[in-house]
DNA sequence: TTGTACTGTAATAAAAAATATTACAGAATG
DNA sequence: CATTCTGTAATATTTTTTATTACAGTACAA
């Protein structure tokens, strides 16, 4: 996960949680995160597909949380932006070597276990709790 | 961690664990992992700096485990190759926004906690246990 | 009904990170 | 002293990530 997507998604959702009575525009959010508004819209599009955010088009439109922050777990955010397991990717080892032949199978198991472990940890923290740290 | 270094390092160490009575050359290991030998030498150089591997130069040289596989925890491998926290990097948010100003501080705490959690999980598995899955 | 302020999305460009390759000096062996 | 290794650096290539631009479509409000 050598990218900034978890940070971006959590930032977006934190803003939506704190200003829960307003529709926030991508331009506003982009100003806070300090990235291009198109990046925000793209991430929001992903968060919508994951059922965390909804939005309203047109003038005066913007985004809001699909559910109360108390019902969103940080694990859902992690799963929404995860592209690669926590421990990284695998090689394409030599199948003629006894280790090379089996290593990816065992690696995959380990990757899954570790990932599940992270998910379990993050499922103990709600967005409400995280957003509560601000002001 | 969108890279292959954990997989590579674990593969190297598994070979060293299984063939613990021999010195393995970087060319041999590269053949099993299916990457360039220079990549293996570079990773071994890192694993040496972390105290997991030793090697002998010159003709007939090669690498071997610095300690018995039973005394190497997978967490040490993770820590040897980690460049970035499990949840990724942070943005450089707008300090004029109350959320932007503090988000990295709270993110960092979360990143550290999650990372420690992964380390704790991986510290319960020894290289011996992992290597034991092969033949 | 028309201008304005949004979203949604795609295409493309630019920057950064990861990996591969080549090269060669130096060490140990026989 | 030729051979077979390691160690390391320099460089090239590929892949991933991020930024930018553009514009169609939607909703509001005058």
Image: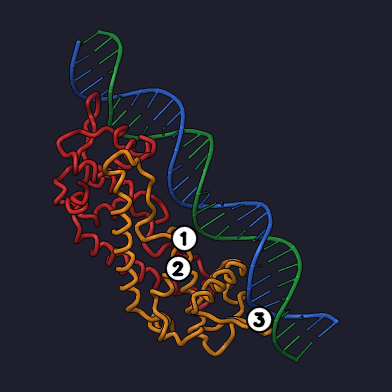
Chain colours: A red, B orange, C green, D blue
- Frontmost of labels 3 and 1 is 3
Labelled pair 2, 1 in contact (Cβ < 8 Å)? yes
- A121 is higher (above) or lower (below) than D21: below
Q: Residues within 10 Å of mark 2 (few under 14, many from 20)?
A: many
Query: Left or right: where does residue A38 sit relative to residue A132?
Result: right
Q: Nearer the viewer, residue B29 or B85?
A: B85
Q: Is residue B51 above or below residue D16?
A: below
Question: Dot 3 lies on which element?
Answer: loop
Q: Chain of mark 1?
A: B
> In x, y percent, where is residue A127?
20, 51
Q: Nearer the viewer, mark 3 or mark 2?
A: 3
Residue at the location (29% across, 46% down)?
Answer: A11
Residue to which mark 1 is pinned: B3
Q: Residue at x 44, y 85 (%)?
A: B69
Give the total number of marks visible in the rendering. 3
| Label 3: chain letter | B
Judging from the image, mark 2 belongs to the subunit labelled B
The residue to which callout 3 is attached is: B57
Q: Position of residue A107 (x, y in %)?
A: 40, 70
x, y percentage for residue A14?
A: 23, 45
- How much space separates mark 3 and mark 1, taking CA atoms? 28 Å
Cα separation, mark 2 vs mark 1, equals: 8 Å
Return the residue nearer the eye: A133 or A123: A133
């Amino acid at each position: 996960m050598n990218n900034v997507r978890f940070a971006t998604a959590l930032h977006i959702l934190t803003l939506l949680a704190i200003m829960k009575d307003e529709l926030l525009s991508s331009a506003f959010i982009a100003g806070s995160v300090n990235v291009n508004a198109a990046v925000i819209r793209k991430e929001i599009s992903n968060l919508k597909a994951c059922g965390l955010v909804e939005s309203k088009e047109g003038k005066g439109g913007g985004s809001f949380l699909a559910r109360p922050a108390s019902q969103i777990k940080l694990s859902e955010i992690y799963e929404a932006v995860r592209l690669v397991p926590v421990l990284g990717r695998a090689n394409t080892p030599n199948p003629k070597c006894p280790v090379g032949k089996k290593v990816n199978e065992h690696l995959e198991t380990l990757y899954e276990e570790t990932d599940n472990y992270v998910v379990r940890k993050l499922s103990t923290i709600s967005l409400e709790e995280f957003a509560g740290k601000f002001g």
